[in-house]
Amino acid sequence: MAWLWLLCALLPAFMVSVTANSPPSFGVNMTLVTLPEDLPVGAVAFWLVATDSDNDHLTYGISGPNASYFSVNANTGEVKLASPLDFETVPFFKITISTSDGLNIRTAEMQVIVEDRNDNIPVFLNTEFSTSINETLPVGSVVFSVLAEDKDTGTAGLVQYFIEKVIPSTANSNNLFRILENGSIVLNDTLSYNNKSAFYQLELKACDSGGILDNKPKTQCSQPVFVSISVIDEPDLDPRFIREFYSASVAEDATLGTSVLTVEAVDSDKGINDIVTYSVSNSTRPGWFDIREDGVIFVNGSLDREQLLLENEEVQIQVTATEKNLNIYGQEAKASMWVTIRVTDVNDHKPEFYNCSLPGCSFSPQEAQVNFIGYVDEHASARISIDGLTMVAYDPDQGDNGTFLLSLNGQDAEAFNVSPERAAGSVSVQVVVRNSEMVDYEKETVMVVEVVATDSVSNNYSVATVTIHLRNINDHRPVFSQSLYELTVPEHCPTGYLVTDKIQATDLDGDEWGPITYSLLPGNGADLFEVEPNSGNLTVKNGTLLDREKQAVYYLTLQATDGGNQSTTTALEITLLDINDNPPVVRGSYNVFVPEENGNVSVTIQAYDDDQPDTNNSLLVFSLLPGPYSSNFSLDPNTGLLRNLGPLDREAIDPALEGRIVLTVIVADCGEPSLSTNVNVTITVEDINDNLPVFNQSYEFSVWERVPGAWVGTVKAWDADQTAANNRISFSLSGTGANNFILQGNVLEQGWAEGSLWLLPDVRLDYETQKFFHLTVSAENPGPQGLDSTANVTVTVMDVNDEPPTLDAASLQAISVTENGSEHGQVTRVIAQDVDTAALLRIELVDVICTKAGVDVGSVCHGWFSVDGNGSVYINQSEAIDYEACHLVTLVVRAYDLNTDPGFDAYSSNGSLLINIKDKNDNAPYFLPNNQTFVIIPELVLPNQQVASVQARDEDSEDNGIIMFSILKAEFVRKDGTSNPVQVFRITRSVEAGLFTGSIELVTNLDSTIQGTYQVTVQAQDQPTLGPALETQTTLNLFTVDQSYRVRLQFSTSKEDVGANMEEIKEALIQATRTSVYVVTIQNIDSTARARASSYMDAYFVFSNGTALTLTELNMMIRKDQDALRQLLQLGLVVVSSQESQEPDQQKLLTSVIIGLVVSLVLVLVILITALVCLRKSYHRKLRAMKAGKEARKTPIETTAPTAAIPGTNMYNTDRANPVLDLPTKDLGLECHSSSDLDYDSLNSLDENSVDLDMDSKEFKRKDLPGDPPEPDPEPLTAVLSGRSAGASEQQKKNLSFTNPGLDTTDL
């Protein structure tokens, strides 16, 4: 015990020493610290501060899972950041801080809050950005959407989007796109695959809205991303040629088909690159060149460069490039370009000579000459050219091919040279004197040389003969043969009287150099005589002055002079002879103007003679000098009166005379010799417009169709009037179609005029529309008379094969062909027509369409028929033709013209030849599968009612496909296997859409008490018009259901309500039983009956195999399907029982009454005995109920089963569980008190049948029926159950209860 006292003494000392050193403590602010996430590693994060009341030296530490973030100075408490913070990874965490004074350690938990900083850049969520858009995408459409994410919070995490760059960077593309705040890229301007770009790359950047980083405002931006946008091209542009200009050259001797040049056009829509075809749409030389579809221009006709000299040796061709497919506007996309083809020269011509002067030479082939004439003086100096020689040498070839050499040949070639000796193209050729001594007129007056032009390349040559006439020069004097000539002349001889013609001078120079001219030198009588200068004939110059009486002899000097003024003289002695020397003298001049037709001439010629009057020398006689028109006039020989013999016609006069008739009147005396005087009478016949223009023929012209502005032909007319005012002709055109032509008039010479007939420039004739034009051309004078004449002009339109053929609609009429090898060979012929004259037509098969009942069945009929080129349609596979496979064969055909001119459509429109396949009775009828089971309930089936049906088809058509039904056999097979034939059925037919239905109907009533199966054999037979009928049979089983399977269902509602809910009731029954429900009757129940049902329904429940449900089977199946059961209960179902007679007949009723009277006496005794027994049972029953109530108070209400009861029972299952307690009766310990099953059932039911229906807790009480005895005291169990507090049951789901007093256990 001593040590205990010692311990007690020391304990206070120990307590003092412990409590003397207090532990340190952290301040209240050491529980939370906030740090920015951008705090640098190594920076002071915070300080650990603790206090110690003992002022001991404190040390600090940090521990825990997150202690690695910090380093702490144990002595000072300074905490530095050891690992970087990241708000986005760990926004907050806890650490354990501690402090120690060496003895005591104090720990605390500190919360570290990481503040967000703008340390993250926005990041795009995906890295591959690409899209494709149509170039026609409307402006404002969303092109693409991007999304960037910034892990920062606040404005630092609010992302904005920017388009930094657009590639390609052009003025058009920089503003082509814009980006919205949500990252949607929107089209801001129109696109163009070809004119702008087919691909864009957008450089995008995402930036946050700014935040704090390192204590400074900071905006973070993402790395750039690129969005690739491909523009999808659409066909909205015409094709274009890859070159702006195409030119080529081809030799003029190129053969047909020679390739000249390849033009190439491409689809301007580069992304589509449609196929381009080419055609020649225009040409300055039609027919010379053509083009293939691949763009190769080739020679299509003979070429001649020389025809192109005025066109710069070039042919212009307009080539049109057309895309194969239509553009987005539904039009052809095409473009045209002119191509220049230069035709180069080949040496195909030799030089030739032309008689013309440059540059006015036309060089037409028909103007080439081989003979030329020139002149030159004899002894002309060297290099003097030949006069009058207009010779041009011309070679139409080009370059070296057109270079030629000139040389001289012939007997006189040494006397001359040709200049130039070498030339190209065309040159004036001169022949010059080479040797003047050889050019001597006296030796040779005409010299001939040949000028030879030789092609310098081909050596082909032409020769022209030049005839050179030498001109004589005057190198000799004239010489007379005599020095004196003696001559005589009558006095007063007429002027011009030939004195002599024998005096001639000669000149060795001849007549070529100026013939000798004669003249009289001045002297006595020189004025009376004259000499003819050329002939030297001496004549009287003025005979009136020759008067012998005045001077008898005259002396004259005659001089002869040549062309070079070389002269000589001789003397003339002239002696006058006396004669009748006074000729008549005519007074005045005579000019008469008279209009033609009606004008008359009447003029008198006045004359006198100075000879002695009344002598023959003075007697005058008048006569007309014969002339072209003198026969039209008469002249009185004595008076000189001149008259016309008939009407004068201006047009009968030579037009060159311009209407003037000059008549010479001879006035002569009667002297010897007779002297006369001539006087001219000029009669001018004035023209009047008395002649119609006339045509010399009718005209027939021809012109090609489709050629606008073509020249048609020329008409000519002539007006005989001789003045321009009266013979001017104008043309006009009339007739059907004259408005297609234009007639251009042109005035020719001598009253002629021509009219050139042309088509109007914009008119193209069409042979198929009008083959001939019958026109009338009128020629008329413009004068007031309005005279005109006409000529018929027939213009024949020459056909161009330009029209596509057409199919004769009559030849495309539908035909019929019988199936299965019934027909062979040709079945029809398709006829084509073409309005062109040179058409060569062929028929081709385009497509074959196989249809059956209007539905395309593919290619089943493709080989059945063929179409020949002449349009004949043949059967190819007669045996394969099958109506059942195809009803209608449509041959799509078209015609094409082998001779159609290039550039025109050679194909007709497609035509359809319908070939109906006629059916042959080759298919037997067949029954359609029928899985239906036919059940006959005899008491429900009445005569004429359908009990079964069959359906059949026949693939044949028309009469071959009509089906008739018949019953071959019918027998009844009993359950024991015995059978006997019956005749209780008949069959009727109906048809709809080719489906034949045979309805089997009952003929008489059936016995409802027997069971078995009716086997009915039905035959289907077609009805062909020709050939045997085909048939097939099938056997039906009709199962019978007898009255033993009749089941009665009782309902709490009236029969009207049951009838109204019949469909729902049958649906629920079918759901529960999976049978067909046949309702026999629905009736109300007598109100005096014990059952609580108001109506009943008798029905049969039959399976598809013909078996039916019994009452027990029905109860079990309804019991298993709780959903159907609930629905039936809601519809009023209360009892399912066996069939009871609805309306007992009188006999049964009488029997029942008799038996009742007999039994009633017995019952009186039984009732008395039973009353005592029942009293005893009632007592025991109440005891059992009280025991059940005791048990009910012990049983939680939650354990009661919510499951609905089986109608007509008080059981939930086969264990006879109590509906209230959900306990078997044996659990109540009452089974020993019951001596029978009736008591057993009565105990369970408690004379009530409660069935839970829904969640409501409504209580249904049995209503007292009129006349019922007063309600007895409630049973103990009922009273206990009804008085129980709900307790916990109020928390449970409520069940809908329905008390069905009409059911009790005895009903089953």
Image (spheres, helix red, strand yellow):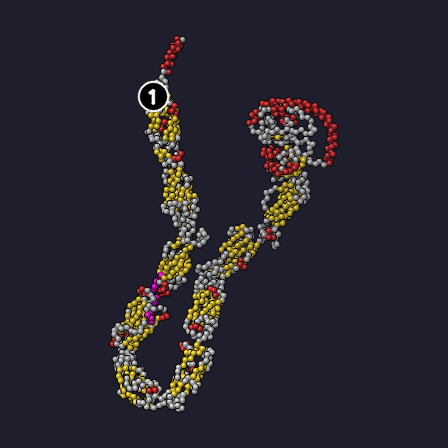
Disc 1 secondary structure class: loop
Q: Which region shows up in magenta? A: 342-357
Amino acid carrying label 1: it is Leu
x, y percentage for residue 1013?
A: 64, 41
Residue 853: x percent and y percent? 56, 51
> 202 or 923: nearer the eye?
202
Q: Kindly identify the residue that appears in the image at 47 percent across and 62 percent down.
A: 766
Above or below 908: residue 983: above
**Residue 914 can be seen in this image:** yes
> Which quadrant is home to the C terminus?
top right
Kindly identify the residue that appears in the image at 73 percent across and 26 percent down.
1165
The residue carrying mark 1 is 58
Q: Residues within 10 Å of mark 1 (few under 14, many from 20)?
A: many
The image quadrant that residue 1095 belongs to is: top right
Does the magenta portion include 349?
yes
Q: Quadrant of the N terminus?
A: top left
Q: For this view, does 205 lie left or right of residue 1099? A: left
Question: What x and y, as percent, mark residue 950?
Answer: 61, 45
